[in-house]
């Protein structure tokens, strides 16, 4: 079962920052997951929430700040004093961390609340510029964007889902992927039947060994964890 560092090594480092990604890049995990929004001036930036409030010392929507303004914010102190002054990274900066590693890069496009027009194209173009399109997976709760990535840009796409659908495997075919990134409760309840129907199941967010073992037993393809090193050692 593949292990992905969720938002980098986010249990031990400030999520979605270069220290968290450098930690993940030094581990023999399969890949890393990260969250992408667009700044006011259209730059791809790596942060989880629509607002900067929770993980920085600022108060605003990401979409309302320019990259220069976002770069002024401290995205480390909220986690612990030792990370003070850590900046919000651009996606290009994160790609650079992994340029000489074998890790798979799962870019979660946060286009489900704000549409961030053109975000899919920008991510694919940037990955191509870094020679990383073959180890890129674009996932999103915005499934038309997943379909766009798969059909128009020929990159791997994954359906993110926490709502339990009537016939997810048939739905996945309409999007054009077998790859499902499911919440832990969804996967524990319905993962086995979806795998039987030919889907590949990746599960977020799995920080407990007993859940990881259950998922491994039913044939899950991978997990996203905030503690990649611990999970590597224990699993
Ligand atoms: O991509 C898996 C997981 O990260 C989806 O939820 O809210 O942690 O981005 P969230
Ligand atoms: Mg995510």
Image (tube, grey):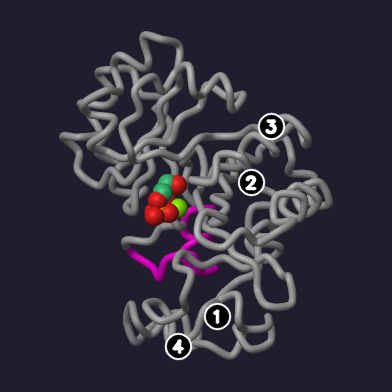
**Proximity of marks 4 and 2: CB atoms separated by less than 8 Å:** no
Which numbered disc flags the more N-terminal residue, 3 or 4? 4
- The residue indicated by pointer 3 is 150
Disc 2 on helix, strand or loop? loop
Q: Residues within 10 Å of mark 4 (few under 14, many from 20)?
A: few
- The residue indicated by pointer 1 is 87
- The residue indicated by pointer 2 is 101
Which residue sits at x=41%, y=81%? 53
Disc 3 on helix, strand or loop? helix
For the record, the magenta segment spans: 12-25
Examine the rendering and report whether any part of residue 180 can be seen: yes
For the residues labelled 2 and 3, the Cα–Cα distance comes to 24 Å
Location of residue 10 in the rendering, given as x and y in whole percent from the top left corner? 38, 61
Q: Nearer the viewer, residue 148 or 203?
A: 148
Location of residue 207 in the rendering, given as x and y in whole percent from the top left corner? 25, 47
Q: Nearer the viewer, mark 4 or mark 2?
A: 4
What's the mark number on residue 125? Answer: none
Location of residue 229 in the rendering, given as x and y in whole percent from the top left corner? 35, 49
Which numbered disc flags the more N-terminal residue, 1 or 3? 1
Is residue 18 part of the magenta span, yes or no? yes
- The residue indicated by pointer 4 is 59
Tell me if residue 24 comes above or below residue 190 in the rendering: below
Disc 4 on helix, strand or loop? loop
């Amino acid at each position: 079962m593949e292990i992905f560092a969720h938002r980098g090594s986010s249990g031990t480092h400030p999520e979605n920052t270069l220290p968290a990604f450098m930690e993940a890049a030094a581990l023999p995990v399969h890949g890393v997951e990260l969250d992408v929004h667009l700044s006011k001036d259209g730059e791809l930036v790596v942060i989880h929430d629509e607002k900067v409030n929770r993980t920085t010392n600022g108060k605003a929507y990401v979409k309302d700040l320019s990259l220069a303004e976002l770069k002024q914010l401290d995205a480390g102190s909220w986690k612990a004093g030792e990370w003070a002054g850590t900046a919000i990274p651009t996606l290009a900066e994160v790609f650079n961390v992994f340029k000489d590693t074998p890790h798979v890069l799962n870019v979660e496009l946060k286009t489900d609340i704000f549409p961030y027009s053109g975000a899919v194209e920008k991510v694919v173009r940037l990955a191509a510029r870094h020679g990383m399109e073959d180890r890129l997976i674009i996932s999103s709760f915005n499934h038309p964007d997943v379909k766009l990535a798969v059909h128009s840009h020929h990159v791997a796409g994954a359906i993110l889902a926490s709502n339990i659908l009537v016939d997810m495997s048939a739905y996945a075919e309409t999007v054009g992927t077998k790859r499902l990134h499911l919440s832990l409760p969804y996967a524990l309840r319905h993962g086995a039947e979806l795998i039987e129907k030919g889907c590949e199941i990746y599960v977020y967010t799995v920080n407990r060994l007993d859940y990881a073992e259950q998922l491994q037993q039913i044939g899950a393809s991978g997990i996203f964890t905030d503690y990649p090193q611990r999970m590597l050692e224990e699993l």
